[in-house]
Image (cartoon, rainbow, N blue to C red):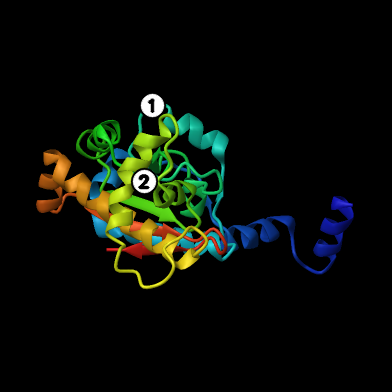
Amino acid sequence: MLLIALTGCQSEGTSPNAMAEEITKEKPLREQVLTAEEQKALTPDQVLESLKKGNENFSGDGLTLRDHSAMVRQAASGQYPKAVILSCLDSRIPVEDIFDKGIGDLFVARVAGNLVNEDILGSMEFGCKVAGAKLILVMGHNECGAVKAGIDNVQLGNITSLVNKIRPAVDSSNNFSGDKGTKNKTYVDLVAQKNVLLNMSLIKSKSDILREMVEKGEIKIAGAFYDLNTGKVTFID
């Protein structure tokens, strides 16, 4: 069937090579991982714009084609990612995919509720100060189970300590005028967004290294909110 299809195309004056070139124009193949020189030349704002453009590709069904086998081999000798992403544990959020990024592009830390702790901070410091990433992005999402547990003040095993870290976002949402329950999606989303902002602040207040890098303009800390229904990311300064 493929032979027939190609023959048909050729009979109309279009060669297989021309067809391949046309496909490549529509969805370019990225064949190289980021180099140290390319990473060094990037600015935090450029990296942020790259993530925004990548999410437009993802939510618009325009993902870049990649040769993962080749990229695995290219990245084996070293890594020079653009950004550190702190995301929720939620299985419906494939971080590299939603930003249309490949192997070696991102450091990704995942924990329920996209919370900052000592280990996450150490990972961020490594990612930025040692490995050269230019952006830290804290990303929450709608219908977050960890946030709902925080609203309900769930007390269960080690989940209790996790919930205690989300409670400040619940407390900071007290001015909400509607129903403050987990069935109210608007309220849940508000608490989730407050949680993103609070963790952005915690990064700067608890890490002298990262705060100094922000002040020098070497990195930027930004926030984001992912919509499970649309695949779109809203960015929060």
- The answer, for residue 52, to whether it is visible in the render is yes
Residue 83 x/y as whole percent: 32, 46
Q: CA distance from mark 2 to mark 1?
A: 22 Å
Residue 85, numbered label: 2
Image point (48%, 44%), residue name: 102
Toward the top, the furthest residue is: 77
What's the residue type where badge 1 is placed?
A: Ser
How many numbered discs? 2
Residue 212 x/y as whole percent: 10, 45
Residue 114's place in the image compared with 187, above or below, is: above
Other residues around mark 1 within 10 Å, as few (<14) / some (14–19) / many (≥20): few
Image-based side of 206 in relation to 110, left or right: left
Nearest the eye: 54 or 211: 211
Q: Disc 2, disc 1: CB below 8 Å?
A: no
Image point (31%, 54%), residue name: 169
Nearest the eye: 198 or 230: 198
Q: Earlier in the sequence, mark 2 or mark 1?
A: 1
* Disc 1 target residue: 77
Residue 113 x/y as whole percent: 40, 45
Residue 8's place in the image compared with 94, above or below, is: below
Nearest the eye: 78 or 25: 78
